[in-house]
């Protein structure tokens, strides 16, 4: 832990010196070095506005340290970063479901953490409603971190460096739940992915050229997928039954939260940003490739009482018909949504 804190301080100190040496004082706004502190021009208004928890370098950096802190779990073996790995857009590479303390397996695929500032609710079932209280769910889940907030605060308050860092931010002791959750939210709110080749294309920036296949894929998406994957966030943040199963005995999805029969089998629409990097797919990680996902929508959709009407064709068939060419073009377009800058941004990594 001490090594992490020291390395972080060294990084920010060096970064500050380099920036200051290249720009005038007027050009160096403190927020510029904080990821996510500038809202992308092609995004809609966020749900968690900047002024709700104004980004600061010190708070963001401490939030980053907390995100990668295994001490937040009961046995010190699992951090937030264990299931949310940066190189796959903070999803969990190769794991169908999350892996918690003592090798316990969760029940769902760990979703990518990106552009959380724009979400009204979280998880595949929309349980958590606030970015700041979101961490309490994995923190206390016995299959994930299996810890209590009280004990986490106790452990943090027993470490001098954490005491000092939090006191510098908030000017009081001991570290409390407000400080802990607000600081962690500084990092998670900053996970903004908005610099893919597609973004450069729509913003008319250098490097934003798309091929003919990619443009055809974009058109197919707009015609056949935009009912759910809308706006430049590529999700409408809603819940749908997309025809995976006939019954939902093991996971009722949105109904797990609402207890409403009409919500059985509905799950959150994931964003398509960085989708080429975030396999496996669906709430239970059943599909390993994008090709399998498209095959499902083309001819794998099954009937159930809450199947979304958009998957019912006028001829009585189910799903979204896609030709071989359309599938190929869609995958080509999906690859334009990969944001290499986000996936490799050292300011977001465990050890900058």
Image: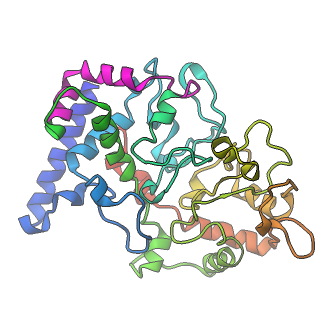
In this picture, is 6 found above or below 122? above
The residue depicted at 80 percent of the width and 60 percent of the height is 295
The quarter in which the C terminus is drawn is top left
Q: Nearer the viewer, residue 270 or 23?
A: 270
Q: Quadrant of residue 195?
A: bottom left
The residue depicted at 63 percent of the width and 40 percent of the height is 94
Q: Nearer the viewer, residue 264 or 143?
A: 264
In this picture, is 110 found above or below 321? above
Q: Position of residue 251 (x, y in %)?
A: 73, 39
Q: Is residue 145 magenta?
A: yes
Q: Quadrant of residue 317?
A: bottom right
Q: What type of secondary structure mainly makes up the magenta span?
A: helix
The residue depicted at 35 percent of the width and 38 percent of the height is 181
The quarter in which the N terminus is drawn is top left
The residue depicted at 71 percent of the width and 48 percent of the height is 260
Q: Position of residue 165 (x, y in %)?
A: 19, 33
Q: Residue furthest left?
A: 25
User: Does residue 76 show up?
Assistant: yes
Q: Please give the range of residues in magenta.
A: 141-167
Q: Nearer the viewer, residue 21 or 33?
A: 33
Left or right relative to 314: residue 44: left
- Asked which colour scheme the image uses, the reply is rainbow
In this picture, is 271 found above or below 327? above
Q: Position of residue 252 (x, y in %)?
A: 73, 42
Q: Position of residue 209 (x, y in %)?
A: 49, 79
User: Does residue 24 show up?
Assistant: no
């Amino acid at each position: 832990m001490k090594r992490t804190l020291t390395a972080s301080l060294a990084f920010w100190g060096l970064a500050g010196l380099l920036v200051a040496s290249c720009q005038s004082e007027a050009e160096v706004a403190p927020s510029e070095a904080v990821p996510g502190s500038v809202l992308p021009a092609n995004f809609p208004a966020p749900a968690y506005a900047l002024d709700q928890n104004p980004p600061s370098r010190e708070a963001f950096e401490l939030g980053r340290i907390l995100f990668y802190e295994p001490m937040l779990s009961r046995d010190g073996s699992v951090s937030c970063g264990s299931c949310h790995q940066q190189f796959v857009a903070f999803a969990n590479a190769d794991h169908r479901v999350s892996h918690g303390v003592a090798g316990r397996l969760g029940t769902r695929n760990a979703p990518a953490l990106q552009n959380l500032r724009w979400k009204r609710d979280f998880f595949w079932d929309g349980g958590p409603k606030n970015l700041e209280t979101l961490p309490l769910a994995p923190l206390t889940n016995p299959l994930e971190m299996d810890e209590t907030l009280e004990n986490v605060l106790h452990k943090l308050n027993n470490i001098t460096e954490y005491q000092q860092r939090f006191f510098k931010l908030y000017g009081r002791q001991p570290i409390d739940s407000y400080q802990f959750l607000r600081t962690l939210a500084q990092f998670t709110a900053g996970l903004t992915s908005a610099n893919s080749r597609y973004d450069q294309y729509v913003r008319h920036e250098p490097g934003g050229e798309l091929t003919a296949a990619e443009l055809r894929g974009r058109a197919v998406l707009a015609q056949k997928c935009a009912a759910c994957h809308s706006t430049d966030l590529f999700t409408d943040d809603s819940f749908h039954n997309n025809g995976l199963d006939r019954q939902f005995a093991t996971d009722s999805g949105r109904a797990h939260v609402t207890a409403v029969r009409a919500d059985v089998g509905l799950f959150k629409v994931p964003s398509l940003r960085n989708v080429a990097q975030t396999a496996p797919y669906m709430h239970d990680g059943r599909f390993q490739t994008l090709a399998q996902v498209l095959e499902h929508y083309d001819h794998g959709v099954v009937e159930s009482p809450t199947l979304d009407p958009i998957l019912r064709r006028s001829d009585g068939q189910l799903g979204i018909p896609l030709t071989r060419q359309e599938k190929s073009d869609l995958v080509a377009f999906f690859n334009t949504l990969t944001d290499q800058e986000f996936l490799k941004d050292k300011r977001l990594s465990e050890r900058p």
